[in-house]
Image (cartoon, rainbow, N blue to C red):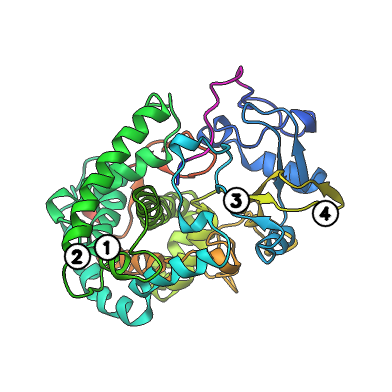
Amino acid sequence: MPDVTDQRTKPSRSLVGRDPWTTPLDEIDLAHPGIWQANEFLPYLARLRRDAPVHYCADSPLGPYWSVMKYKDIMTMEAAPHIYSSEPTIGIVDVIPEFTLPMFIAMDPPKHEEQRKTVQGVVAPANLKNLEGLIRQRVIAILDKLPKDEPFNWVDLVSRDLTTQMLATLFDFPFEDRHKLTYWSDVATAIPGAGLIDSYEEGFEILKECLAYFSRLWQERAGREPGSDLISMLAHGEATRNMPPREFLGNLILLIVGGNDTTRNSISGGVLALNENPQEYQKLRDNPALIPSMVSEIIRWQTPLAYMRRTAKVDTELGGKTIRAGDKVLMWYASANRDADAIDNPDEFIIDRPRARQHLSFGFGIHRCMGNRLAEMQLRILWEEISQRFDKVEVVGEPTRIYSSFVKGYTDLPVIIRSSAVKGQ
C-alpha cells in the first residue's frame, strides 16, 4: 500500500503555523503531511466541513484532487464502487508504473471479491476465537517485562511488539525474523526523503527482499496440504494461486500494512487519549467493563488511516459539485469521524459513548477493513490486562508523529509506569 505524499516535485506548501480559519480555501492542501505530523490538522478538517465539504485542491505538488469531508458523503461514495473506483490506487500519488503493486484493496469487482474471499477465513469468528488465548498470552508477556519507574517508548515496547507478533502468527512467518514484517510495512508507507527511504527506487528494492522471502514460504506451503495461515490460503486459493509476482507482493504488503498500522497506532493513540482526558481514564479505572466500548472510541479517535482515495469512473455530482471522470477523490475518514451531523459530541473522547462502533475508521461497503474484529480483539485484550496490572500508564513527553497524511500514527510515545501504580504490589 504505497503512500501517498511525496512532496518533492514542487516547493512546499505546508500549512504548518498558518491560521486554518483565514487561510484561503484554494490554498488548503490537506494532503500535505506537515499539518498531520505537527498535529495541526483538526481545525482544517473543521474548516472544510463547514465551508467546503466537497473541496477542490487545484494546485498541489501531486496534482489536483477533491477532498470529501462529511460522513454522509463518504458513505455515498463507499456504496457506489461503480462510480468511484478503487483502481488504480488508494493513495494520492498517481500510478508510477514501475513501482505500482496490484492489490485487492485497489481492485474493483469482481476481482476484488475473489481475492478478498480467499484470505478472509483467517479472521473468521472461529479462527479469532482460537487466537484469543494466544494473544492474551503474548500481551501478558509483553506487559510483565515493561520497565518500572523509568521512561520508555510505548510504541516500540508494546504497540510495535504486539502487532509484529500477531502478523507473524497470521502468516505463520518465522518468529525469529518477525521484525522484518513491520520494517517492510514502514517502508511500503514511507514518503521518500522523510527519513526511512530516500527514493521510491530504494523502497522498491527493499520490498523485493520481502517478495523473495515470501516466495520461499509460498513454495513450501504450495507443496503441502492447505493450512490456515495467509500464505497457505494465497498459495492454494483458486483466485490467487496463479498471481504474478508483483501482484503477490502487492497483496502481501496490503495484508502486512492492514494487520499492522491500524492496531499499532490505535494502541499508542489510546494511551495518549486517556492521558489527555483524565476523567475518562478514571471512568475506566472505576469500571473496566467499559473496555469494549472504549476500544471502538479509541479507533474512532485515532482514525489510523486518515483517508482513502477513489477515482471517478464517470462524470458525477457530490455535495453540489461536479466531479469529472478521472478525478482523484479523497475520502477523509479523519474528518467524517469528527462530523457532528453523524456523531454526537465528536470532539469529545467518551469511552462509554452510545453506538461507539458508528465510525468510519474501518471504511464501509465492499472495502470495509477485513481485520476489524481482530484489531478490536487485540485492543480489548491489551486493555483488560493493563487494567489488571497498572493503575496508570503515564505519558511523560510529547509524542512524535509520522510524517504522513495517510498513516496517522506515532514513532515515539514516552511513558512511565510507576511502581506505586502497579497493582498487587
Q: Who is closer to the viewer here, 303 or 241?
A: 241
Mark 1 vs mark 4: which is more N-terminal? 1
Q: Residue at x 49, y 64 (%)?
A: 369
Q: Residue at x 60, y 51 (%)?
A: 334
Q: Amino acid at mark 1?
A: Ile
- Please indicate whether residue 420 sits to the left or right of residue 118 in the image: left
Q: Who is closer to the viewer here, 270 or 134?
A: 134
The residue carrying mark 4 is: 319
Label 3 close to label 1 by CB (< 8 Å)? no
Q: Quadrant of residue 241?
A: bottom left
Residue 407 at x, y = what percent? 48, 44
**In the rendering, which numbered label is found on residue 231?**
1
The correct choice, above or below, for 174 with respect to 201 in the image is below
The residue carrying mark 3 is: 334
Q: Which residues are magenta?
A: 3-12
The residue carrying mark 2 is: 221
SS at circle 3: helix
* Magenta-span inclusion, residue 9: yes
For mark 3, does the 10 Å Cα neighbourhood hold few (<14), some (14 to 19), or many (20 or more) residues?
Answer: many
